[in-house]
Amino acid sequence: MKKIIGFVLILSAPFTSKAQDWHVGGILGISNYSGDLSEKRIDFRYTRPMVGIMVKRDINRFLTLRAGFSYGNIAGADSTNRDTSLMARNLSFRSNIWEGQLGAELNILDIDDKGYTPYVFAGVSLFSFYPWAKDAAGNKVPLRRLSTEGQGMPQYPERGNQYALHQVSIPFGAGFKYLFTDRWTIGIEVGLRATFTDYLDDVSTTYIDQNTLLAERGQQAVDMAYRGDEVTKLFPGTYPLDGTQRGSAKYKDWYVFSGLTFMYRLGGSDGLKKTNFSRCFKM
C-alpha cells in the first residue's frame, strides 16, 4: 500500500508544483542510424536533420522529469560502403521518424548554484517509421508492403507477419546545460535510441525464393529485394538463391537524435537565480 501511495504522489506532483519548476522549449539538431546498411557503427555521411519540442519539470535540484515529441529522418545505402559484398547488394533506404517520449534527467550538479550541469537521461518512447527507397527510375517505393524477406507469406511462416510500423524504443544519453539567463537554459544533448526491431532499413535476414516473391508480391518486390543487377558493370547481377544472407538479425537497429537544446523557465521571478550573464547587464 505504501508503494502505491508513493507512486500516486509522484504522478500528482507535477500538478501541485510551483510554476517556476516547469520548462518549455525544444531541440534542433541531427539524426543518424545504425543497422544493416551501415558498415560503420554510425555512418555520418547519412546525417539528417531533426527537430523536437520538450516540456520539463524539476522534482528537486538533481532530478528532472521530461516529455517530448521529435521528428527526424534516417537513411543508409550500400553504394557508399567499402565492403564489396555490401556494394554488390546495392540496397538503400530512407525513413521519417516520429517519436514521443517520457523520461527523467539526473543532473550531476545544482544548476541554480553552479550555473551549469552535465546530466544523463533515460526513458521510454513510442515511435513510427516507414522505410522507402527510390527504384532505378527514381520513383519513391514504400518497402514494407513488398515483403522483401517473406514477411507475411505462408511459404515462410518463420518470418511472421509484416513488421509493425509503430514500435517502442529506449532513449538514453547525456547532455550539458547552461543557465544562460534567469529564464533561458541552453545546452547540447546526444540521445541514443535502442529499438526492438531490425527493420528500420527493411533488411534483417535472408533472401527468399525469387519465383515465390514474384508470384506473391510482383516484379517490383523482386526488383527492390535485390538490386545488384543495377551495378552489373562492377558485379554480377544474379538474384541470390533462397536462404542467401541478406542482412543480420543478430543486432537490432538503432537511431540517434542529437542537438542543441533551449528551454524557457515558466513562473514568477521569485527565487530565480541571478546568473553571471544577467549580472553583466544589470544597471
Image (cartoon, grey):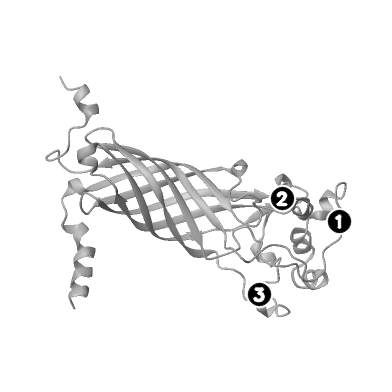
Front position in the image: 139 or 131: 131
Which mark is on residue 159?
A: 3
Which residue lies under the disc numbered 1?
Answer: 237
Residue type at mark 2?
Answer: Asp
Q: Amino acid at mark 3?
A: Arg
Look at the picture and state if 162 lies above or below 57: below
Q: Are marks 3 and 2 in contact (CB under 8 Å)?
A: no
- Write the residue at 71% across / 50% down: 78
Answer with left or right where residue 179 lies relative to residue 208: left
Give the mark nearest the N terminus, 3 or 2. 2
Residue 114 position in % (x across, y down): 23, 37
Disc 3 element? helix
Count residues near mark 1 (Cα–Cα under 10 Å), then give few for <14, some for 14-19, many for 20+: some
Residue underneath mark 2: 78
Structural crowding at the residue carrying mark 2, measured as other residues with C-alpha within 10 Å and reported as few (<14), some (14–19) or many (≥20): many
- Whole-Å distance between the Cαs marked 3 and 1? 26 Å
Going by the numbered disc 1, the residue's amino acid type is Gly
Q: Secondary structure at mark 2?
A: helix
Which callout, 1 or 2, points at the residue further toward the start of the chain? 2
